[in-house]
Structure formats: structure tokens, C-alpha cells
Amino acid sequence: MGTIMTRVNDKNRAQELRKQGKTYSEIRAIIPNLSKGTLCGWVKNIELTKNQKIIILQNMRIGADSARDTQRQKGSWTNHLRKIEKTKQTVSEAKTEIDDLIKDSFFLMGLMLYWAEGDKSLDRQRVKFCNSDPLMVTLMMKWFREKCNVPDNKFFIELNIHELMNKQEMMGLWTKVTNIPESKFTVFVKPTQYDSLKNSSYRGTCSIRIHSVDLFRKIVSWRIFALEKMGFDIKNAPVAQWIEQVFSKH
């Protein structure tokens, strides 16, 4: 009997709330254990004023927007945590791999050349190696392919030349050096005030770009762990501090 009376009271309460212009969600939040189907049956014959209908639609939109915002925030946080774990994995792999890689003279040669001529910004975290020596660029292309396992479709080449140079000739030269097709080249032509090149052997500056944050993190981690293996004090190095920050995140 008590249960029946409770349901009757719930029905009366639900109908009163509906007459006040409450949404189904608001009513169910006030009356516990009330299914949407039951509520629909209780209030289906209640006519709402035009103003109440407008208010309900506005509240429903606000609720939907709030739910979407909450879902976006949850998704953003999940992606944030996933990126942190991915970075930790990349750094941990580099630390494990360096034990064998440090014995490879070619690997160390490329790693040190990247340290000297590559982009090392922890803010940008991009892989970019720039030089004007074709032989050095050839070496680094080999290093990226063989030691970093970069496929050809991931390479992009930037070529900086003077306007006195023959663009097609320079592109042909650097295409052979990198073994990357001209379609993957971006060429920047710099104006000059001179009538001729001062250095006749200069063939422009070639930049190798690889769009991979993971590879950047692997390279800088390899370097700092290699230096540690060699007995250098790395604790004050920016990369070491960055790694410490990564592993302190949750």
C-alpha cells in the first residue's frame, strides 16, 4: 500500500512540476527512480504555455551544450594522458636502445651531427636537419633511413638558393643527393645585391624535414642517454630536465 501511495504522490508531484514548465530531466532529477517512459505517461496530457515551451527548449539546448562540453573535456583529458604515456614509452625505449646503439659508430656520427646541425627546440619538437654540404646531407639521409627507420614518404625537403642560381639545376642536384623526388621539395629563392656568387662551389642550403614528434623525442633522448653512458653530467641539460618533467606527470 505504501509503495502505491508513493507512486501516486510521485505522479502528482511530477504533474505539478511539469505544469511549472520543468523539463523531463529536471523532473527526474527531483523524483528518484523515475523512468522516462513512466514520466511521459504521467504528463502527456498536460498542455504547456508557449512561454514554457520556449523555456524548456532553451534548457534542453543548454543541457545538450553542457553535455557536449563535458564530453569534449573528457576527450581532451584522455588524449592528454595518452600523449603523456606515449612520450614516456618513447623515452623509455630510447634509454633501452642506447646500450646497443652506442656501439655503432655510424649511429653516433649521425646523432652528433644532428646535435650540431639539427633542430633541438623542445618547444617546437620538430625533426629538421640543415646543411649546405651535399656529402653531409647524403650521410644524414642514410642515417634517418637506416637508424631511424624513416620511410621515403615521410621526408620533405626545403631548398634555399640565391636568385643567381639556376633553380632547376639546383633541384636536380639535391634530388640526386637526397633521392627524394622534386614533388617533395619546397624551394625558397633569396634575392642578392651581387652580380655573381662569391663562392662558386655553393649549391644552396638543404633542409631535411620529417613530421614526427615521436622521432624528435627519440633523437633527443638517445643523445642525452648516450652522453650519460659516456660519463657526462647531464642533470642540468634541458633535455634531461624535460625528461624528468615528463615522468613526473600523471
Image (cartoon, helix red, strand yellow):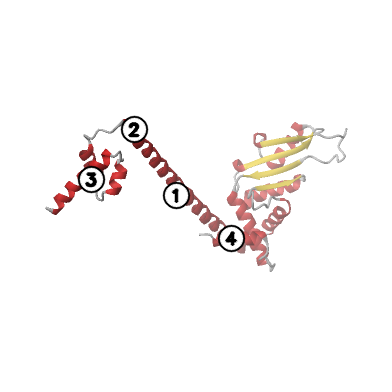
Which structural element holds mark 3?
Answer: helix
Residue bearing the label numbered 2 = 51
User: Which quadrant of the figure has residue 227?
Assistant: bottom right
Q: Is residue 85 left or right of residue 230?
A: left
Cβ atoms under marks 3 and 1 closer than 8 Å: no
Q: Label 4 amino acid?
A: Gln
Measure the alpha-carbon separation of dots 4 and 1: 23 Å
Residue bearing the label numbered 1 = 74
Question: Residue 74 at x, y = what percent?
Answer: 44, 49
**Among the two numbered marks 3 and 2 on one chain, the one whose residue lies closer to the N terminus:** 3
Q: Is residue 67 visible?
A: yes
Q: Label 1 amino acid?
A: Lys
**Among the two numbered marks 4 and 1 on one chain, the one whose residue lies closer to the N terminus:** 1
On residue 5, the disc is none
Cβ atoms under marks 3 and 2 closer than 8 Å: no
Which structural element holds mark 4?
Answer: helix
Q: Residue at x 66, y 39 (%)?
A: 180
Question: Residue 47 at x, y = what percent?
Answer: 25, 33
Q: Residues within 10 Å of mark 2 (few under 14, many from 20)?
A: few
Measure the alpha-carbon separation of dots 3 and 4: 55 Å
Measure the alpha-carbon separation of dots 3 and 1: 35 Å
Residue placed most toward the observer, 193 or 176 = 193
Q: Nearer the viewer, mark 2 or mark 4?
A: 2
Residue bearing the label numbered 4 = 245
Which structural element holds mark 1?
Answer: helix
Q: Residue at x 70, y 40 (%)?
A: 158
Residue bearing the label numbered 3 = 13
**Among the two numbered marks 1 and 2 on one chain, the one whose residue lies closer to the N terminus:** 2
**Among the two numbered marks 3 and 4 on one chain, the one whose residue lies closer to the N terminus:** 3
Looking at the image, is 189 positioned above or below residue 145? above
Question: Residue 106 at x, y = what percent?
Answer: 69, 56
